Amino acid sequence: MTEIADAPLVLIVEDEPATRALLAGYFHEAGFLVAEAENGKQTREVMQRQPPDLVLLDIELPDEDGFTLAKSIREISNVGIIIVTQRANDGDRVFGLETGGDDYVTKPPNPRELLARARNLLRRTHPSKMYKAEGAVRYFAGWTMDLARRRLVDPAGIEVRVTRGEFELLGLLVRSGGRVVTRDQLIDAVSGTDRNPNDRTIDVLVSRLRRKMQDSGSLDVIVTEKGLGYRLAAEITDQP
C-alpha cells in the first residue's frame, strides 16, 4: 500500500521494547504513521522534528516522570494525549487528566481498545486526516474500494454488492497494505456487524468475498496465512 503522507502520526512513548513494538505494529497495520520514543528526551526530539497528531504516553519513563512530560507537552502543543500506565487508582487518573491527558488507559493495554480510543480522539482533533486514513479510495488488482462511500467496484467497472461485514473485513485487509491481519483484528473490525463474531464468522465472510470476486472474473487475492490470519496478495495504491 502507498502510505498516505498526511495520515495521522502517532507517537508511542514506551520504555519497554516489546510493548512498544506491539503497539507500533498494531497502529501501523491500522493505517497510521508511527513514531517511537523510549524516554522523555527522545519524546521531545520527536516533537520538535516531526510533531505528531497523537501521543500514547507511558508514565513510568527511565529519565522523567510522565505526568511532568505530559504537562510540558501540553504547554507547547494541543496534540491529543492518551496516558498509558500501570497506575490504576482514581487519584492518578484524575491527575493525569488534569496535567494534559485527554484519556487514560491502564496496562496491560488491550490494543483493540486503545486503537478505538485513539480513533475517537483523532476524529475530534483531526477529522480531515482521519477521513483520509479511513475514507480514502484504494485500488488493488483492478478493483476499486471507496471506503467512505462504501462501494466496491470490480475490474469491469461494475459495482459488487457486499454485506456490511464483508465490506469491513475487506476494508481492513486493504488498509493493512498486504500485511497479515490477525483473526482478532478481523473480529474487531466486524464486531459491529455481527452479534457475536468469532473465527467461524471470519471464515464465512472470507469465503463469501472470494466467491463474489471470482464471480467477477478475478483471481483469489485473499490469502490464508495458517495460524495467523489473512492478507491481501495484491499491490494496493491510492492512485488508479
Image (cartoon, rainbow, N blue to C red):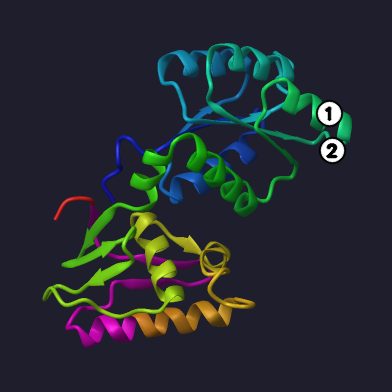
Q: Residue 225: within the magenta?
A: yes
x, y (%) of residue 106? 76, 41
x, y (%) of residue 185? 54, 61
Q: Is residue 23 depicted above or below 227 in this figure?
A: above
Q: Tell me what residue is drawn at x 37 percent, y 55 percent.
A: 175
Any mark on residue 88, and which? 2
Q: Is residue 88 left or right of residue 160?
A: right
Specify the segment rendered in magenta. Answer: 210-237
Q: Is residue 160 left or right of residue 12?
A: left
Name the residue beneath numbered marker 1. 92
Neighbor class of circle 2 (other Cα within 10 Å; few <14, some 14-19, many 20+) is: few
**Secondary structure of residue under mark 1:** helix
Q: Residue 211: within the magenta?
A: yes
Q: Are marks 1 and 2 in contact (CB under 8 Å)?
A: yes
Residue found farthest to the left: 156
Q: Is residue 200 depicted above or below 141 in this figure?
A: below
**Secondary structure of residue under mark 2:** loop
Q: Is residue 18 depicted above or below 151 in this figure?
A: above
Neighbor class of circle 1 (other Cα within 10 Å; few <14, some 14-19, many 20+) is: some
Quadrant where the C terminus sits is bottom left
Q: Amino acid at mark 2?
A: Ala
Q: Tell me what residue is drawn at x 71 percent, y 18 percent.
A: 62
Any mark on residue 63, and which? none
Q: Tell me what residue is drawn at x 44 percent, y 21 percent.
A: 51
Q: Amino acid at mark 1?
A: Asp
Q: Tell me what residue is drawn at x 49 percent, y 34 percent.
A: 125
x, y (%) of residue 14? 63, 30
Q: CA distance from mark 1 to mark 2?
A: 7 Å
Q: Is residue 133 depicted above or below 149 in this figure?
A: above
Q: Is residue 126 left or right of residue 22?
A: left
x, y (%) of residue 219? 22, 78
For this rendering, which residue is in front, 121 or 111?
121
